Image (tube, rainbow, N blue to C red):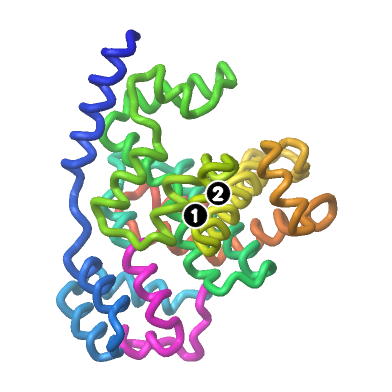
């Protein structure tokens, strides 16, 4: 494939991305209200009432074992004191993206990887005392949404790229280029901007592969650098943990990571037994996290929430 042809194909892909469903108005409005100075429980509750579908899915999430609210709640407004404004906003975003990128026929492996990254990111953030482990979870859940968007708008080419990665051992970005696709992190960043994501979610989506570059690290604010590093490290942990899904021994070794990821893990004391323990906890906590996939109506994804 020639370079002009690649550019033309990439341009077509990005135009198709622009044609994806927009996020619900309620998600955008909640984002605006939560980031204002005078947000109140009543304001958020009233906004959620305008979208019964999102409210119903939100109730299923907050009443799940993941949050463990004593006695549960029957009204979304009553859940806010338990989960907080930021977490609620992140849940609404997660629900909205899962629905917007619902791939016909399912995208089991993609969403399971995203969920494993999210779970590992939360575990890592908790241990590193990151001030917002909920944002780390959501950033992990959405970090590869560019891949899922590609699977939705160009399933044949995306399948071709994935086959190249599996059969030839080449990098995902190179496989996407050879298949005439835009890089998935660029696609994800494009969507994050289109959907008005806050910087602490948009940056890990765009830079989870580029965070090891000095130029990228230096221009990011410390909080954005930290959350992006956490998601990048969690991505490595998730790939190692995924071997369990294939009944292979769950043994994780930082030597298999990119040098920059390895350095980040070791800098924070994650090597050897401690890294293995992080991987094990991720797999244990994944059982509680799987309810996120149950909010999708597609039968393949509902099956994925029970499997694996």
Look at the numbered disc 1 and give the secondary structure of its residue: loop
Judge by depth and name the residue closer to the eye, 176 or 77. Answer: 176
Residue at 34 percent of width and 29 percent of height: 182
Judge by depth and name the residue closer to the eye, 272 or 212. Answer: 212
Mark 1 packing: few (<14 Cα in 10 Å), some, or many (20+)?
A: some
286 over 232 or under it: above or below: below
Question: Residue 220 got which mark?
Answer: 1
Q: Residue furthest top?
A: 2
Assign the magenta stretch its main secondary structure: helix
Mark 2 packing: few (<14 Cα in 10 Å), some, or many (20+)?
A: some
Residue at 26 percent of width and 69 percent of height: 54
Judge by depth and name the residue closer to the eye, 33 or 235. Answer: 33
Q: Quadrant of residue 285?
A: bottom right
Q: Which residue is mark 2?
A: 217
Q: Is residue 8 magenta?
A: no
Residue at 19 percent of width and 85 percent of height: 46
The stretch in magenta equals: 66-94
Relative horizontal placement of residue 261, taking residue 179 as reference (left or right): right
98 over 10 or under it: above or below: below
Residue 176 position in % (x across, y down): 41, 25
Residue at 61 percent of width and 52 percent of height: 234
Residue 40 position in % (x across, y down): 29, 90
Residue 116 visible in rendering: no
Relative horizontal placement of residue 305, taking residue 122 as reference (left or right): left
70 over 303 or under it: above or below: below
- The total of numbered circles placed on residues is 2
Q: Are marks 2 and 1 in contact (CB under 8 Å)?
A: yes
Residue 139 visible in rendering: yes
Q: Quadrant of residue 94?
A: bottom left
């Amino acid at each position: 494939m020639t370079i002009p042809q690649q550019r033309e194909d990439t341009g077509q892909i990005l135009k198709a991305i622009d044609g994806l469903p927009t996020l619900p108005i309620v998600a955008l409005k909640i984002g605006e209200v939560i980031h204002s100075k005078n947000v109140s429980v009543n304001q958020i509750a009233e906004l959620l009432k305008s979208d019964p579908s999102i409210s119903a899915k939100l109730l299923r999430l907050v009443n799940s074992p993941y949050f463990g609210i004593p006695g549960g709640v029957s009204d979304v407004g009553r859940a806010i004191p338990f989960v907080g404004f930021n977490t609620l906003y992140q849940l609404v975003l997660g629900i909205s993206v899962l629905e917007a990128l619902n791939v016909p026929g399912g995208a089991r492996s993609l969403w399971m990887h995203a969920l494993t990254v999210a779970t590992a990111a939360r575990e890592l953030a908790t241990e590193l005392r990151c001030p917002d482990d909920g944002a780390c979870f959501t950033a992990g859940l959405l970090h590869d949404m560019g891949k899922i968007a590609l699977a939705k708008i160009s399933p044949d080419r995306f399948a071709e790229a994935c086959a190249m990665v599996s059969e030839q051992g080449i990098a995902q970005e190179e496989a996407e280029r050879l298949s005439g696709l835009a890089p998935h992190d660029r696609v994800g960043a494009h969507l994050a901007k289109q959907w008005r994501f806050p910087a602490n979610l948009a940056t890990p989506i765009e830079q989870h592969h580029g965070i090891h570059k000095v130029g990228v690290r230096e221009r990011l604010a410390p909080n954005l650098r930290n959350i992006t590093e956490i998601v990048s490290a969690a991505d490595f942990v998730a790939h190692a943990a995924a071997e369990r899904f294939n009944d292979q021994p769950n043994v994780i070794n930082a030597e298999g990571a990119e040098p920059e990821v390895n350095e980040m893990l070791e800098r924070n004391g994650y090597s050897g037994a401690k890294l293995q323990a992080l991987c094990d906890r991720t797999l244990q906590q994944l059982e509680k996290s799987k309810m996120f996939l149950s909010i999708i109506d597609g039968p393949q994804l509902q099956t994925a929430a029970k499997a694996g």
